[in-house]
Amino acid sequence: MAMIALNIMPIAYISKGLRVDEIVKSPHKPDFPPEKIALLETIAANLPGMIFQILQRQDGSVFIPYISSGCKDLYELEPEAVQADFQVLCKLIHPQDIKAFTESIAVCGNTLTPWHWEGRIVTPSGKLKWIQGTSQPELQEDGDFLWHGLVMDITDRKQAQEKLQESEARYKAILDAIPDLMFRISCDGEYLDLKSEGANITLSREEIVGRNLQELLPSDVAAISQVAIAKTLDSGILQTCEYQLPTPLGVRDYEARLVVSGADEVLAIVRDITDRKQGEVALQNLAQKFAKAFSCSPDSITISTLQEGRFIEVNDSFVNLSGYGRDRVIGKTSFELNLWVDDRDRLNLVQDLQTTGIARNLEIEFRQKSGEIITTLLSAEVIDLNGIPAILAVHHDITERKQVEAQLRLCAQRDRLLAETLVRIRSSLNLEQILQTTVTEVRQFLQTDRVFIGLNNANLGVKTLAESVDPKYPSVSGWSTNDEAYLQELKNLLKDNVVRVVEDVTQMTVSPKVKAHFQKFQTRATLTVPIMLGNELFGALIANQCSGTRDWQPIEIDLLQQMSEQVAIAIQQSQICQKLAELNTNLEQQVQERTAQLQQKMQEVEKLHRVKDVVLHTVAHDLRTSVMGNLMVLKNLLNQGLGAREAGEQGAGGKGENKKLPLSPLLPAPYPSASSQSPISISRSIIERMIQGNDRQLTMINSLLEINSCEKQGIDIKLEPVKFSTLLAGTFAQLEPILTQNQATLKNLLPADLPLVIADGMRLQKVLANLITHRLQNNPPGLNFTLSASVEAGMIRTQILDDGVVMSKVECDRLFDLHVRDPQDCCSTSIGLKMYLCRKVIKAHGGEIGVISHRKRGLTFWFTLPLATPSATNRP
């Protein structure tokens, strides 16, 4: 049976069976009588589902003798497809129902009990169906099992059940969600049932059901309830009554709604309306407060209809603001009162209110009864007034604030204009440009027709320096006059440095010439500010209004006064610059003269330098020749003396170091006389000191000549790739005699794999020899040197450390400089020249050189040289 359970076709997936003729022709068909087949077809044709037979043989094979034609309607599959592979029906089972289906088949196969299963399928077209399958297994004589079954579509029934369950759940949820008490009460006032979930009730269900209203409620409340019950039963219409009951929380208000719920009984729904009652009281209090706020508010408040704008109510502040009496306003529209400066403002307000229902802080201009324009901040909301949409509007007068803001803006513009003018005056020396920009910006600020600056000059009379004018009106630029009487009258108008303010020139008492001048240039109002240079009237800054009379404001007068001061500063600055230009002209002449004198002196100095170089070169060469000659003589003398006296000195047992040596007869005597041919005895030590002195002089002279050549022509070095470790080893091999003579040692810590450097080998050997010699000559015998090198940032850094005496920082800083040495040190000058040349050589290689003095003992000389790169190797 387990095998049957695993291989049997699910009833819910069998679609269409074999036809009778196909069963007869099938080689594997069982022996079914024709009358049985006819019976199956008759039954299948009259059932709204599908009939099936499945034969499970003992060898485990499955055969489908019959499937009714309802298979196609139920499963949307052809019978041939099912007979070829009846497992295709398993794929139609809803995933959530496969487990239950499998379990039902297993139970039926193990117990041979009737099979029953309900579940969902998804047809090939995507339809969801509920089906019900039943089957009864039957044991055949040959041991096979024959399953007879029926599959029916129960989708409609399932949907009806689901809707009924949803409806019941919905009504139950509604009932549970109602927080009110519900009572079933009989006609005589007996409590039949109640629903108290979610309600605040102190009595239990057992204490209420079965008792009468008179037992549980106060007598007055019970009487009211009994009357309401009778009215409800008599009229069959909903009845409502309100009452109060004492509770542990205090006296509470309740509302009972009664409807007929059955024969001689009503359903009473009782609700706690205490909060609503309190809200109504609060609303009444709020209405009283609103009425007081409405009448006492300092802001204008109006109530008008939404569509027409007809006033329904206004407060006293509106009466004061608009100038209209209350009786004149009520019943009129805002258009009839001509309140809107721009009628489109109300249209926009109504559109906003219809869209959002609220408007906040709209800046609107209104016209008062007197015709004066005021500015208000309008806030409004739509309210319902007895079924009529109305506008509750509050107007806050901000006219004074707007005037103050405008005044502040003018002040800010004035300050900006003054600051920019001051900056131009300080940053520019072009007086014409400064004055023209000033009149242009002043006219823009004043919004007037003409602004110009007039000059009062004793020689030129009156002249216009700069002007900005509206093209519609004539220009005063180029106008001038030499009429003394007219000029004097114009000066009198500005006497005592007084600002002249004229709002209407026709009201002035002036001469016909001045009136003619005003008419010629169409001047209707004028504002004139004098420009004073000290106590002298230089000119005037003038603003004209040509289009009509004008009331000049204090801020405008103040602006012109301050601008006139700035213009006076600009004029004074221009005059000062003009004087400075004249002084500069004289100064340039003096500078040119001084420059010529300086150039003459420089030429003289250059001639002296050339003379110095000639003298230095000539004297150095002469000294060099003399010193070299002295050295040759002294060395020959020393050698001859040693050869002549060597045997005698040895026979006498002396070493000869302090012995007297006769001068050679070949040398000229210092004082020629008859006795000059006699030999002069000179000690060996004196000759050696003379040789040392001449050596130092020769070295110094050579250094001077080399330094002079370096300063004039530069150091001639021949750069080539050099193996640095080999170069240093060869140099110190040459220095071995002098190191031995001074009992000095050298410890070589150079790495064997040092890279190549670009250098002049001969020059570097001299540098190393000079550094070692410097330390040997300035230290007692027994000095120890340590040589090391490292590669740092494309350079080789070489260090020569010794344990000799230290030097001060000042001495270290000046060691490689060319300066006058200590006169008491006979060797200092020569050594100093060599150290100076060392730095020149290292600098010429592109490196650096220096010395570090240690705290307790010793110095470290260091210098750097560039590595041999391909670009440096190919450099000529």
Image: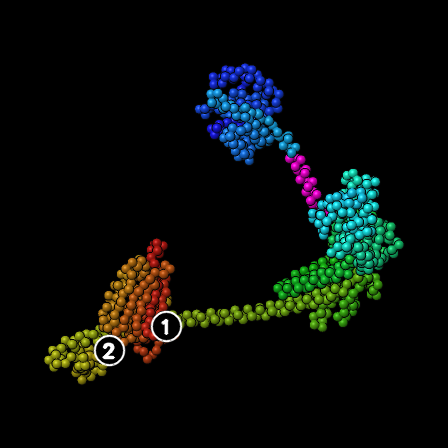
Q: Main secondary structure of the magenta part?
A: helix
Closer to the observer: label 1 or label 2? 1
Estimate the x, y position of residue 631 in percent, counting from the top left: 23, 74
Estimate the x, y position of residue 733 in percent, counting from the top left: 24, 65
Q: What residue type is labelled 1?
A: Cys
Q: How is the image coloured?
A: rainbow
Quarter the C terminus occupies: bottom left
Q: Which amino acid does label 2 sit on?
A: Arg
- Magenta segment: 162-181
Q: Which residue corresponds to mark 2?
A: 689
- Answer with left or right where residue 471 lies relative to residue 586: right
Can you say whether 178 is above or below 134 in the image? Answer: below
**Circle 1 residues within 10 Å: few <14, some 14–19, many ≥20:** some
Q: In which quarter of the image is residue 445?
A: bottom right
Describe the element under mark 1 as helix, strand or loop.
helix
Q: Which of 24 and 135 is in front in this view?
A: 135
Estimate the x, y position of residue 427 in percent, counting from the top left: 61, 64
Q: Which of marks 1 and 2 is nearer the N terminus?
A: 2
Can you say whether 299 is above or below 175 in the image? Answer: below
Q: Quadrant of residue 746?
A: bottom left
Q: Which residue is drawn at 68% across and 37% down?
A: 167
Estimate the x, y position of residue 860 in percent, counting from the top left: 33, 69
Q: Residue at x 57, y 19 (%)?
A: 40
Q: Which residue corresponds to mark 1?
A: 812
